[in-house]
Amino acid sequence: MSESMQTRDRNIAREADRAAGSESLCKGCRESVAVPESHLARILAKIRPEDSVSEFLYEQRLSACGSCESLSYGTTCMHCGCLVAIRARLKTSHCPHPSAGKRASWVLAVQAEAHAQI
């Protein structure tokens, strides 16, 4: 299928969704940008324990994201497009905010966890 046909099909699908009353559609896809809690819970349940941070660190990271002006729809980071609940849960994740001050909140959360374990 050519790129112009894919674009046309995508536009038709968007129009159909709008006509059907879909709200808050993402620019890049036909999915709603509002992510239900049940969907997040299913994804989080699939993360292996060895790939997850502690509950304490997870809550600290979520708190940092929750207070960030770059959080969109209560679920999405505007810097990378990720679902913050997923990023906050993964050990290998980092804060994608371009400001060192914002990124520091994740580093401080790690330090707070280390201190709490002493």
Image: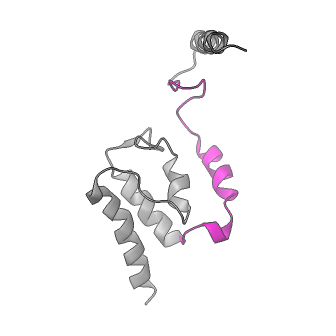
* Furthest residue in direction front, as rendered: 2
Question: Main SS type for the magenta part?
Answer: loop
The structure residue drawn at horizontal position 52% and vertical position 22%, both measured from the top left corner, is 23
Report the quarter where the N terminus lies: top right
Where does the image place residue 73, in percent across and percent down from the top left?
44, 38
Question: Residue 34's x, y, as percent?
Answer: 53, 35
Q: What percent of the width, then of the height, locates residue 43?
A: 66, 51
Q: Is residue 69 left or right of residue 23?
A: left
Residue 15 screen position, x and y as percent: 58, 10
Q: Is residue 37 above or below residue 10?
A: below
The quadrant the C terminus occupies is bottom left
The correct choice, above or below, for 25 with respect to 75 in the image is: above
Q: Residue at x 59, y 15 (%)?
A: 14
Q: Residue at x 62, y 66 (%)?
A: 51
Q: Magenta stretch containing residue 62, yes or no?
A: no
**Residue 17's image quarter?**
top right
Q: Which residue is nearer to you in this view: 28 or 41? A: 28
Image: magenta residue range? 25-54
- Residue at 70% over, 57% down: 46
Which quarter of the picture shows residue 32?
top right
Left or right: 102 as drawn, with respect to 50? left
**Towards the viewer: 18 or 4:** 4
**Up/down of 17 relative to 82, above or below:** above
Quadrant in the picture for residue 44: bottom right
